[in-house]
Image (tube, rainbow, N blue to C red):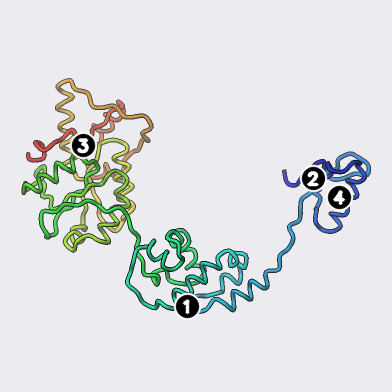
Amino acid sequence: MIGIPVEELISKFETYQQGVDYIEKQVAANKLVPVKSSGFNGKRPPLYQRYRKVKPKVDHTPLVIQADRTIHPPLSAAFYKKHPAQFEQDQPMIYALQNWLADHSACEPVSCNERSFEIFGQEKILARHGERLCKNLGLDLEKLAFYQTCEPLSVVSRSNEPGNLLIVENLDPFVSIRNLIHQNQPAILGFPIQSVAYGGGRRIESTFMDLLQFGTESQKQSLTTVYYWGDLDYEGIRIYESFASRYPDIQIVPWKPGYLAMLEQARAQMASGRLMPVYKEGQIETEGDCFFSYFDSDFRDQILALWKQGSYIPQEILNASHYKA
């Protein structure tokens, strides 16, 4: 409920009347306001059961004047003149940025944390406050000339020529395919692969940005269609769909030769009496509509039936002997 109980406000007084005098003086000084909806306390003289403290008004005029006088182009003071309390909090960052801009009209791009330390003397401020600060000041964030860094994406290519890029969710199949590429194996499961990358599960959403920024020219030319291959389980499908939606300007599709070979091998093993592994607890179910749209209904029905039984197909069901087929 809104407000402070009157008993709490007058508990320090020896008599009720002393408490009444105190409450009346606080109300007259506009330091307390009765919460009329709380009703009276039933005593004489009556007091309301709850009171709300009035926050003292602060004159922000000096801050408005200071923002107007101290923030200079290319920065704009318009936002902070309307929000002086925020100006008071952001002052050190604003002045540090303004000083840096005065000496750096043009410069080579560096990493976000490197630029942050150069401007503010702390490496994390730009990542935490840079976008907000520049928006408030009417400054294009690109003028700070920095790039975001992420864990590098491990990529192996046959040559410097562009070609199909396959991203593999798990380490073991990545290493196996990498070895075959080093051995000049012409195709993997009959599919021509120019480059293979290690996705590492959900890390691919950030590490893929490293390829976009710092990949070789031939690797960047290979990004018209990117092939993704992972486990045939809820998590593997969720990873693919999240990854594909993160980069809508790039066509990221399931690598059908890998998934079809996994199902074929699983069917052969189950026909001989071997069961597929059981889901670990905590898996979040998914319909996989985006993923399954690349396959026919028979493939989808078989995978969904397997999932309904609580089982899945890992990438490791295949190995180098299958990849060479």
Mark 4 packing: few (<14 Cα in 10 Å), some, or many (20+)?
Answer: many
Q: Toward the viewer: 300 or 265?
A: 265
Rounded to the nearest angstrom, the CA distance separating label 3 from label 1 is 54 Å
Rounded to the nearest angstrom, the CA distance separating label 2 from label 4 is 11 Å
Q: Earlier in the sequence, mark 1 or mark 2?
A: 2
Mark 3 packing: few (<14 Cα in 10 Å), some, or many (20+)?
Answer: many
Query: Of the residues shown, which amino acid type is indicated by label 1?
Result: Pro
Q: Is residue 87 above or below residue 283?
A: below
Residue at left 50%, top 75%? Answer: 75
Residue receiving disc 2: 50
Rounded to the nearest angstrom, the CA distance separating label 1 from label 2 is 51 Å
Q: Toward the viewer: 138 or 91?
A: 91
In the image, 255: left or right of 111? left
The tag on residue 74 is 1
Q: Earlier in the sequence, mark 3 or mark 2?
A: 2
Query: Of the residues shown, which amino acid type is indicated by label 4?
Result: Ile
Residue 275: % across, % down: 22, 23
- 3 or 4: mark nearer the eye: 4
